[in-house]
Amino acid sequence: MNSERLMQEIVERTRAEEALRKDHSLLVTLSQQVPGVLFQTIISQDGHISTPYSSEKLHDIYEVSPDDIRNNIDAISERFHPDDRQRIFDSISQSTSNMTRWECEYRVNLPRQGLRWLFGTAQPQRMDDGSIALYGIIMDITERKFIEESLKNSEEQFIEAFNKSPLLMAISTLEDGCYIEVNNLFLETLGLNRDEVIGVNSKELNILADYGQRARVLEIVRQRGYVVNYELSVRKSDGEFLDGLFSAQIISLQQKRCLLTTFQDISDRKRSEVALKNSEERYRRLFEMESDSVVMVDDETGKFIDVNSAAVRMYGYSRDEFLQLKHVDLSAEPLKTIEFIRSKGTADSLRWHKNKGGTVFPVEIAGSYFEYQGREVHVAAIRDVSERVRAEKLLLELNNNLRALSEHSQKVQENERLAIARDIHDDLGQNLTVLKLDLEWIENRIPVNSSEITERILEMRDSIEKLTVSVQQIAGNLRPPLLDNMGLVAAIEWQVDEFRKRNNIECYLLINEEVDRINQDFATPVMRIIQEAFTNVIRHARATEVSLSLCITHGILIIEISDDGCGITAEQANSQFSYGLMGMRERVRICKGDLVVQDTQGRGTSLYVTIPLYNEERTA
């Protein structure tokens, strides 16, 4: 009997074990098909947490084995993200306290996989011993979270782009055109409020200037799925119309077919186009009215793009013939023309061109460079300056004649001064001497007691002496006798001495020994320049001191005359009424030299003269 019972127990146990093996095999098979780890977690009354069972996918989820958490869950709690750990335990505590389903999304840091997102859900069940068992599943939702995050970012970016777009944007239902969403620019531009737009269609808002345009746009959209840059007009709330480019595309939003639309305001561009057209018309009229020849040349090819009627008349080519030519075809100096264009020249006062018949004539060119229809062009105004060149040539000849006449006049004047000085010195001097001798003869023959006559004779003698001095001074001013008899240095020293005596102005003189060897052609104008400079000091400078220096360096005579007077302004130095300076400049020019007047900032005036003594022209 006992053996039969024992056998029966063995058979039942064997059957139970076989059933258990089948159940376990089934559980393993099922757990392998589940996209996560199946688990049974026991929370004892003292708060200890263990996991008696977890499927093999625990390796994939937490990178630990089921044996590592069988007695406690420390191996996986260490994997919890620090920011999520407390939230996980709080959610478990709330679930077990209320005996409600546990659900939680949280992050873990895994040694191999790094940061991962997990989702856990379990159903709590109270056990006979008072502990609570959680039966559930934990899945890796990292990919889903990344997708959700990307979608969230995309939505945020779309919303930001939608609101910050430089275009008017709107989303409306395809069928009835009711607005679902519009951006801020849409509202600001049209002068509308969001509350009066959302849920209302464009017809009710009276936005479109021609509502029939919407039907035409919808027809295109239904055929192609989109429309791009359809030109139409919209009406603002104040009644003003805006011209723009309308684009639309069908999209799916909340399982509804909607229309995403954009509107680009081109009102300013349209106005600019009208203004440009008017400007081009004005330009064309001015282009044709210009009396000078005006040409437009492609900077890269050198070919003419456009010419006005004046150019056709000046060069003799028809407009069609012009458009077959290049800029060098008009030039009598092609290499200079190429260099002028290459250097981006904008003005040339003299260039030689030729017309269709081959006649060469001078022109003046003024132009500029700019971009026109996608290419750089050169526009030039060309003026025939034949008359001006002829006039300049005549003027140059006249100036040369005047300068030659001036130089001749200077020589004649010096000769006349020399002759007058000699006449005064010889004739007047001799006559004064005779008069003085006659007066002495009379004086010797008057009675001794004739005091009145004697006194008068003395007065006459004094007058004759003064007159003799005046005659000598006049003759000296006309032509210092020392200049011809003793040379330039002696004449300058006499002039300086006379300047001191007559004007009570201190004068310092510095001359190197080579100065006295210059020839008479230079000595006379140099003397006259110094005399005129001293005259200007007396008349205008109000000076107390004057310095004069002459030296020769490398065949150049350098003269410097300075004073400590009131100075001279640039206007005074260049005035047409400064006859003294004009005379000095003319004498310096005749000597092929240079003259510079410098104001020393209120401390007087300095005059610098340089004269080349051995240039070929003077030597010849």
Image (spheres, helix red, strand yellow):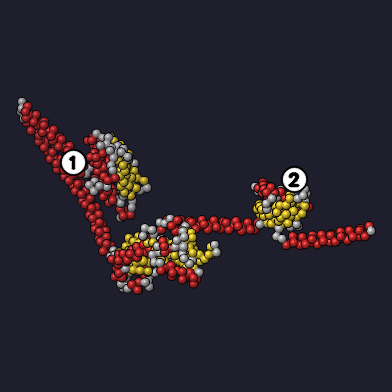
Q: Residues within 10 Å of mark 1 (few under 14, many from 20)?
A: some
In this picture, residue 356 sits left or right of residue 25: left
Compared to 407, does 25 lie above or below? below
Q: Residues within 10 Å of mark 2 (few under 14, many from 20)?
A: few
Residue 474: which numbered mark, if any?
A: 1
Label 2 secondary element: loop
The label nearer to you, 1 versus 2, is: 2
* Image quadrant in which the N terminus is located: bottom right
Residue 74 point in image, percent of width and height: 74, 48
Residue drawn 9% across the image and 31% down it: 457
Which mark is first along the chain, 2 or 1?
A: 2
Q: Residue furthest front?
A: 1
Position of 427 relative to 616 (above/below): above
Write the residue at 72% across / 57% down: 37
459 is higher (above) or lower (below) than 315: above
Residue 257 appears in the picture as rendered: yes
The amino acid on which the numbered mark 2 sits, given as a three-letter code, is Gln
The answer to whether the residue labelled 1 contacts the one labelled 2, judged by CB atoms less than 8 Å apart, is no
Percent x, y for residue 452? 6, 28
Tell which of 67 and 164 is nearer to you.
Answer: 67
Residue 396 shown left or right of residue 435 in the figure: right
Relative to 495, residue 620 above or below? below
- Kindly identify the amino acid type of the residue bearing the numbered disc 1: Ile
**Residue that badge 2 annotates:** 45
Q: Which of the two residues, 73 or 41, is positioned nearer the viewer here?
A: 41
Query: Percent from the top left, x then y, of residue 326?
Result: 38, 70
